[in-house]
Image (cartoon, rainbow, N blue to C red):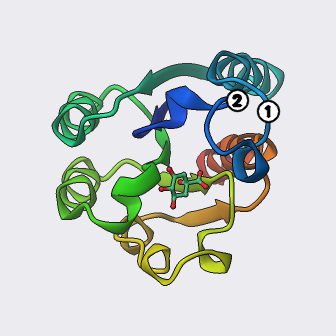
């Protein structure tokens, strides 16, 4: 099972960025957490982070035929990016959307998620653990 994990803008600032919302652990710690979750559940994972919408679209396109699942935290692009939605639709790789916080409990502008329109599942408000839940879900789907 090959899983591509994509993290969007400002997630590289974890630990510094609004710790009362996102916690005090760093992005490096998130990467280590994701790698160990993938290892624990027997998945090969690649992690990609970008602050640029086009770079995320390019990475999704390049995943075509290369990955069995995508875990994506599109960060602020969740609420704005039809381009990321279309790229995910184009490659048709089963996708799970993850958010560290629960956007539904925050500002109104965070209530819309374009990625939710294509995601098999959304995990929100569970911090780092949400990524492990997403990996487990994709492995379960593949096993069916
Ligand atoms: C986020 C929630 C988004 O609304 C926000 O723009 C982020 C992070 C989360 O993980 O909780 O950057 O996706």
Judged from the image, the secondary structure of the residue bearing numbered disc 2 is loop
Q: From the viewer's perspective, is 131 left or right of 50? A: right
Crowd class of label 1 (few under 14; some 14 to 19; many from 20; radius 10 Å): some
Which label belongs to residue 24?
1
Q: Are marks 1 and 2 in contact (CB under 8 Å)?
A: yes
Residue 2 visible, this orientation: no
Q: Position of residue 95 (x, y in %)?
A: 47, 52
Q: From the viewer's perspective, is 19 left or right of 116? A: right
Q: From the viewer's perspective, is 90 left or right of 128? A: left
Q: Position of residue 108 (x, y in %)?
A: 49, 84
- Viewer-closest of 97 and 3: 97
- Viewer-closest of 62 and 75: 75
- Residue assigned mark 2: 15
Quarter of the image with the C terminus is: bottom right
Judged from the image, the secondary structure of the residue bearing numbered disc 1 is loop
Up-down: is 95 above or below 135? below
């Amino acid at each position: 099972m090959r899983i591509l994990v994509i993290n969007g803008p400002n997630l590289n600032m974890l630990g510094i960025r609004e710790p009362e919302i996102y916690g005090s652990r760093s992005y490096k710690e998130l990467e280590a957490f994701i790698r160990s979750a993938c290892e624990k559940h027997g998945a090969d994972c690649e992690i990609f982070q970008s602050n640029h919408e086009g770079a995320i679209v390019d990475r999704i396109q390049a995943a075509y035929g290369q990955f069995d699942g995508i875990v994506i935290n599109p960060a602020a692009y969740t609420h704005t990016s039809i381009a990321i939605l279309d790229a995910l639709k184009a490659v048709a790789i089963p996708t799970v959307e993850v958010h560290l916080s629960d956007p539904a409990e925050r500002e109104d502008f965070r209530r819309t998620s374009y990625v939710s329109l294509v995601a098999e599942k959304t995990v929100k408000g569970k911090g780092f653990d949400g990524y492990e839940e997403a990996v487990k879900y994709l492995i379960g789907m593949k096993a069916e």
